[in-house]
Each structure stands twice: as structure tokens, then as C-alpha cells.
């Protein structure tokens, strides 16, 4: 074995061009697979850092509009348990019991509950037990629990489940890249083994068994794969840095991705598997004793044509490469178009030039609504006085702030809502200049103003989708909604005073975005909240340069008031698109890599074919055949392989498009534009790969070719 390994290394060093190309192809395939597997391991496979973490479940409520609805406070949670969240400070939830709203069962302020399965209890059995509890809660509290069930999920799955489909897609994509690389190197290995036919025939004639010859070639391919795996580790390390830079900033599991013993073991296994895949077929083809005995009886010609069987086998590998490349190109095109649609989706406001930061007033110092209202009034006044500020406003549940607030509503004077089927709307609490800060036009009625004071009847604005859906054919201004944002059971109804455009508040295609809830706006002077986002519309090119002045204005009111999450609206929007951007970038890179490898493989087969048919082309030219006919003859085989590969790949691309449907935004799985673009790109590159060998066939010197005879 050691002798064979040393011999394989010497033979590879004698063919540096072949060795470099083969090692590079395998390194790209193995490196990409190792990098993506490292991410899959960190995000999906690695257990959570808790004892028996597989027993932990997250409990949310399932209702008509969502399967991930939060639970109410009267559900909760052992004191020693902590949530997986990117937080620097944890506060005891029990402190919230002083707030009357928190103790209401129909209030769901974003809470989750955690549980641990009993020993031997499955999640399905727990779900059955929880269904009984949900029915009992519905019986005991019909007003708040009708239509609600309990949805338990494994905590790991609940934490990273949103990324599962994307990572599976990427793992399948790099698997295709690896198959293309292996097919490429297998073709090269077979061509090289055929060139060594006489050497192998002599070995067979001297008594070497078929297994001995196969082992010789398999060891050589394994040495290639090990070298490719070693080089692939460097590619994997570099790729992981890029993946972490592109990954969602709040997805902590992505940031924990690393190369450890497990992933190194995976890389080693892939390298050895590649060695087998790359070498077993060429070794089996070349080591056949019948074909080797025929080699010894050859008349010493330098370039006979290969057997039809071997040509067919190499053609199958090329067709496979072209087909897989088309599948990846089509998939990358779909995700690229989806990402472009996400980026260009109408927002309903102008995000450029907006500075954002969050504030949370401590109730120890701001223990009354009057104090809270006074602080925000002073804040807006001082920030608007700063140079370079056009408008300033506060809001809760503003666009792309990673919060969601929805509530049921009832149109005053209409029949009561059916329990469990109440319509819901997204709730926003904003100051009067909010619409000016976001440059949202008023479509009907008026905006909030001085007449909407704390002791005045509550006003509300709705968006255009609310108006179309619930007030079709009539003016919604002046209509009334029951006020469900108060503890007063006899509160006067809310008056709709205006209509504004619909605003996108979450990433296009996100689960909450797909709900397409209508939107309603409360005035911050009438419905005061302690936690708000400050929005500052600036005229300076970079809004972040204004942040220090804004922070000083805040601290001039209260030196102890903390400020968090300073950013721009454009940055917040960009971060919300991190997951589709990562998928699009990686899938595009893998598709480009597949296209390169497939074209190189096609070029190699065409070049070998032209080399083997040198005498044939020389005879044709000597007999007077036009060079353009020789060109068409040489080009025809390559175009045939490309055509068959594209036909097979088209079927795979259509199937892949269907599988991608759930990951796409505003793009169908059978969208013709990405598919046509992939076909054109593949046809152009593969045509070039066929063109140069075919052109070389027309330059064969008939005298030189015939001299071989």
C-alpha cells in the first residue's frame, strides 16, 4: 500500500496540469460542502446549551390568523429558566403584575412559555394533553380563549426552524456542485488512465490481477481527493467568514459556526467518498483484462479513437454536469429575482434619511402618564430644533423594528364578532409628526393634531386596506370603532379621522407580512406608552452623523435615560433581508461554480475527442473536405451533449422551481424569465467550451495527421 501511495504521488507530480485542475475542482466542491455543513451543524444539528435540551418545548397559541401567536401572562414560567434571545439584561417577569392589562387573559403582549417534557413523553402525546387543556380554557374563559389552541414545538426547531428550508436548499446546491466536480475529475482521470493503457497492459501481462490494477488507480484518485480536501479546508475557512458576514445579525447560531472535529470528520469523509466516486468508474473501465490485452496488440498508433462504450460513459458524465448546472442556474435566478422583488417592494414611506433609536422610560422615574407625555413632548421639540432635522416623531411598532402588535377590533354599531373569528389589525401608536417624518401622504381626512389631546375623545387613523375591506363604497372618516385599548368598559368609541397609505412593516414574504393585516394608528398623546422608537427625518447625507446630537438632546432632558439600537431605517430594512440575501448570494456563487466546472468538463471531453480523431480529420481534409464541414462535425458532438444535458436539466429545473415556491417572494416557481436566462447563459458558456476544440480540429495538418499511419 505504501509503495502504491508513493508511486501515485510520483505519477501525479509528473502531470502537474492534470493534478492542479483535479485538486482545484475537488477543493472547490469539498470546501463548499464543508462550509455549508458547518452552518447546518451549528444551526440545525448542534443541541442547545442546556441539559437534555431535546426535552425543551416552546408553547405558543394557535389562532385563526397565526400558528405562532403569543400567550397571555396567566400562563408562565419557572424562575430559573431563561429564553434564548440576544439580550444583555434579563428582568423578572413578575414585576409586570403591577400592570392591570398584563393580568387580562385576552392580552397577549408577546410572551412565550417554555416547558420540559416528562421522561418518556413524546411531543405528540404532549400536544394531545395540551389540546385537552385548551378545550378546558375555552369552556372556562369563552370570551378570551375561543378559537385558541396550544402549539408546542421543540425549542431548537422553534428557534431555528425559519432557516431550515434555506439551509436544506444550500446543502442540496453544494451537493450538486460536488457531483459536478467529481464527474469532471472522473472524466479527466479516465482520459489519463486511457493514456496509460500500455503501462497497465504490461502490468496485467506480468500477472497483475484486475483488483491490483484497480487498487493502483483508486489509490491515485484517493490521493487526489485528500489533497483536494486539504485545500478545501482553506476554502471552507474563508467561506465561513463570508457566510457569517452575510448571515442575519440576530441569528446567534449562525455566528457560532466554526470548524470543529465533527466538521473536520465530515470533510475527511467527503474527501474519501470523492476519491471512490472519482476513481472507481475509471478504474473499473480501464482495468478490464480483455481491453488491456487488446492494447498490447495495437500497432503502435499514437491516437486511435476510443471505444464507443467509453465515449458514451464520458458523455453521460458531461450531460450530468450540464443538467446539474442548469438546475443550479435556474434556482439561483429564481432567488435573485425574488430578492430583487423583496428589495423593490413598495414600502408606503420613504426610508432614506431617517435616523432611528429606541427609548424605554423607567416607571420608577416616570410613574404617571403625564410625566411620560411631558418627556416625549420635550424630546420631539428639542430634536426638531437641531440643525439638519426636518421632522421628529415617536412611535411604537414602527416599520422594521422587529416588533409586532396586532389586536382584534369591532366596528361600532355592527353585530358582535363571532368568538374566535374576530378581525385583527396591526396597531401603531404614533405622535402627530410621524407621517411627516416618514413622508406618508394623507389620503383622506386629517392627521393627528392639537385637537387630539389627552382629555379629548380618542381619534384613530386607518390605512387604505382597512378602508377598502371594512368600509367598501363609503367614506370611513367619521365612522367609529370600539375602544379596546383601555380598561374603561364604558369608554366612548374611537373616531376615524383620516386614511393613510398601507405601510410595509416587516420583510416582504415574512409570516407576519403574509397576513396582510389592516393597520390602525393611535395618537401617542392619547395612548401613552413607555417604550418607543424615535424617528428623525434629516437632510444630512448620513443620518448616523446626527446621532450624537440627538443623544445629547435626550440627555439634556434626563441624563440617566439610556438610548439603544441607534441605526438608520435603511439599515433596519437591509438587516431584515439578511436571510434571503445570504441564500441568494450563496446559491448564485454555487451556480457560477457549477457553470465553470461544467464548461471545463465539456471542454476537456471535446479536446480529448478532437485529439483522438486527429487522423480522421486529417484524412477528411486530405480528401478535400472543406474546413467548415470539419468544424461542424467536431462541434456537433459537443452541441449534442449540451442539448441533451439542457433537456434533462430543464426537467430538473422545473422540479426545483416547485420546491422553491415557499422560499420565494412575488415569484412563481415556474417563472420563465430566470429559466430562460439560465438556458441562455449555459448555452453561451458551453458553446465557447465546444468552439475552441472544434476550431482546433480545422487546423489539423493533413500531412502530419497521415504521417501517424
Image (spheres, rainbow, N blue to C red):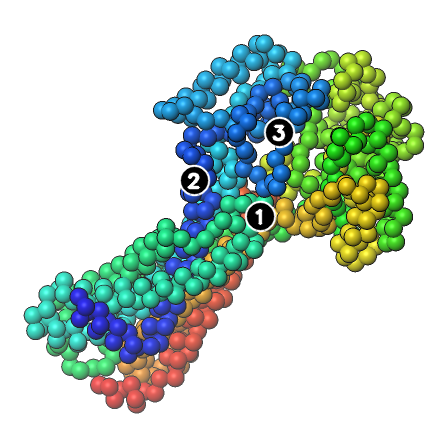
Q: Quadrant of the N terminus?
A: bottom left
Place of residue 396 in the rendered image (x, y in percent of width and height, measured from the top left): 74, 35
Mark carried by residue 45 = none
- Badge 1: residue crowd in 10 Å (few <14, some 14–19, many ≥20): many
- On screen, residue 487 above or below 154: above
> Hey, which residue is sitting farthest right in the picture?
451
Which residue is painted at 46% across and 39% down in the image?
49
Q: Is residue 368 left or right of residue 36?
A: right
* Labels 1, 3: front one: 3
Q: How many marks?
A: 3
CA neighbours of label 3 inside 10 A, class few (<14), some (14 to 19), many (20+): few
Tag in front: 2 or 3: 3
Instruction: Report the Cα–Cα distance between label 1 and label 2.
Output: 20 Å
User: Which quarter of the figure has residue 104?
Assistant: top right
Mark 2 vs mark 3, CA separation in Å: 26 Å
| Residue drawn at (36%, 24%) of the image | 120
Question: Which quadrant would the C terminus be assigned to in this image?
Answer: bottom left
The answer to which image quadrant residue 228 occupies is bottom left
- Asked whether 476 or 497 is in front, the reply is 497
Residue 248 numbered tag: 1
Q: Are marks 1 and 3 in contact (CB under 8 Å)?
A: no
Q: Is residue 383 shown to the viewer in this render?
A: yes
Image point (67%, 25%), residue name = 96
Q: Are marks 2 and 3 in contact (CB under 8 Å)?
A: no
Q: Which residue is mark 2?
A: 47
Find disc 3 in the rendering and name its residue. 92
- Foreground pick, 253 / 223: 253
Amino acid at each position: 500500500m505504501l509503495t502504491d501511495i508513493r508511486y501515485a504521488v510520483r505519477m501525479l507530480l509528473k502531470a502537474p496540469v492534470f493534478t492542479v485542475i483535479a485538486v482545484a475542482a475537488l477543493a472547490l466542491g469539498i470546501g463548499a460542502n464543508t462550509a455549508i455543513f458547518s452552518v447546518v451543524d451549528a444551526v440545525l444539528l448542534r443541541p442547545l446549551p442546556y441539559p437534555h435540551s431535546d426535552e425543551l418545548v416552546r408553547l405558543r397559541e394557535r389562532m385563526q390568523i397565526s400558528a405562532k401567536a403569543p400567550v397571555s401572562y396567566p400562563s408562565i414560567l419557572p424562575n430559573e429558566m431563561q429564553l434564548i434571545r440576544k439580550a444583555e439584561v434579563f428582568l423578572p417577569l413578575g414585576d409586570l403584575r403591577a400592570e392591570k392589562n398584563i393580568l387580562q387573559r385576552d392580552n397577549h403582549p408577546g410572551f412565550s412559555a417554555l416547558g420540559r417534557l416528562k421522561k418518556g413523553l413524546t411531543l405528540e402525546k404532549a400536544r394531545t394533553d395540551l389540546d385537552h387543556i385548551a378545550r378546558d380554557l375555552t369552556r372556562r374563559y369563552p370570551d378570551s380563549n375561543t378559537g385558541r389552541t396550544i402549539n408546542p414545538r421543540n425549542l431548537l426547531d422553534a428557534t431555528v426552524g425559519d432557516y431550515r428550508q434555506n439551509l436544506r436548499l444550500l446543502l442540496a446546491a453544494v451537493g450538486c456542485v460536488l457531483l459536478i466536480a467529481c464527474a469532471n475529475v472522473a472524466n479527466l482521470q479516465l482520459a489519463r488512465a486511457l493514456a496509460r493503457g500500455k503501462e497497465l497492459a504490461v502490468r496485467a501481462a506480468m500477472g497483475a490481477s484486475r483488483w491490483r490494477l484497480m487498487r493502483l488507480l483508486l489509490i491515485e484518485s484517493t490521493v487526489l481527493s485528500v489533497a483536494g480536501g486539504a485545500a478545501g479546508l482553506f476554502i471552507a475557512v474563508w467561506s465561513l467568514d463570508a457566510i457569517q458576514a452575510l448571515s442575519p445579525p440576530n441569528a446567534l447560531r449562525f455566528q457560532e459556526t466554526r470548524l470543529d472535529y465533527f466538521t473536520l470528520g465530515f470533510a475527511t469523509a467527503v474527501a474519501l467518498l470523492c476519491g471512490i466516486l472519482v476513481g472507481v468508474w475509471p478504474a473499473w473501465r480501464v482495468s478490464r483484462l480483455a481491453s488491456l490485452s487488446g492494447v498490447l496488440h495495437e500497432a503502435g498508433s499514437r491516437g486511435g479513437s476510443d471505444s464507443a462504450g467509453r465515449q458514451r460513459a464520458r458523455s453521460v458524465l458531461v450531460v450530468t454536469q450540464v443538467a446539474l448546472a442548469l438546475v443550479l442556474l435556474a434556482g439561483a435566478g429564481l432567488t435573485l429575482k425574488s430578492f430583487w422583488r423583496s428589495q423593490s417592494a413598495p414600502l408606503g414611506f420613504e426610508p432614506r434619511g431617517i435616523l432611528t433609536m429606541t427609548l424605554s422610560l423607567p416607571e420608577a422615574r416616570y410613574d404617571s402618564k403625564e410625566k411620560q407625555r411631558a418627556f416625549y413632548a420635550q424630546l420631539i421639540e428639542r430634536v426638531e430644533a437641531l440643525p439638519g432635522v426636518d421632522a421628529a416623531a415617536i412611535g411604537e411598532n414602527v416599520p422594521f423594528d422587529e416588533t409586532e402588535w396586532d389586536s382584534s377590533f369591532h366596528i361600532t354599531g355592527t353585530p358582535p364578532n363571532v368568538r374566535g373569528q374576530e378581525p385583527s389589525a396591526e396597531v401603531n401608536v404614533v405622535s402627530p409628526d410621524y407621517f411627516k417624518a416618514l413622508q406618508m401622504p394623507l389620503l383622506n381626512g386629517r392627521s393627528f393634531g392639537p385637537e387630539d389631546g389627552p382629555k379629548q375623545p380618542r381619534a384613530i387613523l386607518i390605512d387604505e386596506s382597512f378602508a377598502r375591506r371594512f368600509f367598501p363604497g363609503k367614506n370611513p372618516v367619521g365612522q367609529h370603532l370600539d375602544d379596546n385599548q383601555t380598561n374603561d368598559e364604558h369608554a366612548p368609541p374611537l373616531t376615524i379621522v383620516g386614511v393613510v397609505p398601507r405601510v410595509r412593516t416587516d420583510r416582504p414574504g415574512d409570516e407576519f407580512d403574509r397576513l396582510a393585516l389592516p393597520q390602525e394608528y393611535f395618537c401617542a398623546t392619547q395612548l401613552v406608552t413607555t417604550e418607543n422608537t424615535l424617528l428623525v427625518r434629516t437632510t444630512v447625507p448620513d443620518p448616523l452623523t446626527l446621532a450624537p446630537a440627538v443623544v445629547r438632546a435626550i440627555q439634556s432632558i434626563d441624563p440617566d435615560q439610556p438610548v439603544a439600537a441607534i441605526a438608520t431605517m435603511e439599515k433596519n430594512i437591509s438587516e431584515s433581508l439578511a436571510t434571503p440575501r445570504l441564500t441568494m448570494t450563496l446559491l448564485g456563487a454555487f451556480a457560477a461554480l457549477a457553470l465553470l466546472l461544467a464548461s471545463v468538463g465539456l471542454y476537456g471531453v471535446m479536446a480529448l475527442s478532437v485529439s483522438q480523431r486527429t487522423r480522421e480529420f486529417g484524412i477528411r481534409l486530405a480528401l478535400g473536405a472543406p474546413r467548415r464541414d470539419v468544424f461542424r462535425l467536431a462541434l456537433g458532438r459537443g452541441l449534442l451533449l449540451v442539448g441533451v444535458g439542457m433537456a434533462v436539466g430543464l426537467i430538473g429545473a422545473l422540479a426545483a422551481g416547485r420546491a422553491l415556491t415557499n422560499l420565494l417572494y412575488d415569484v412563481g416557481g415556474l417563472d420563465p424569465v430566470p429559466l430562460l436566462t439560465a438556458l441562455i447563459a449555459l448555452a453561451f458558456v458551453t458553446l465557447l467550451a465546444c468552439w475552441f476544440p472544434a476550431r482546433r480540429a480545422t487546423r489539423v495538418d493533413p500531412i502530419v495527421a497521415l504521417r501517424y499511419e
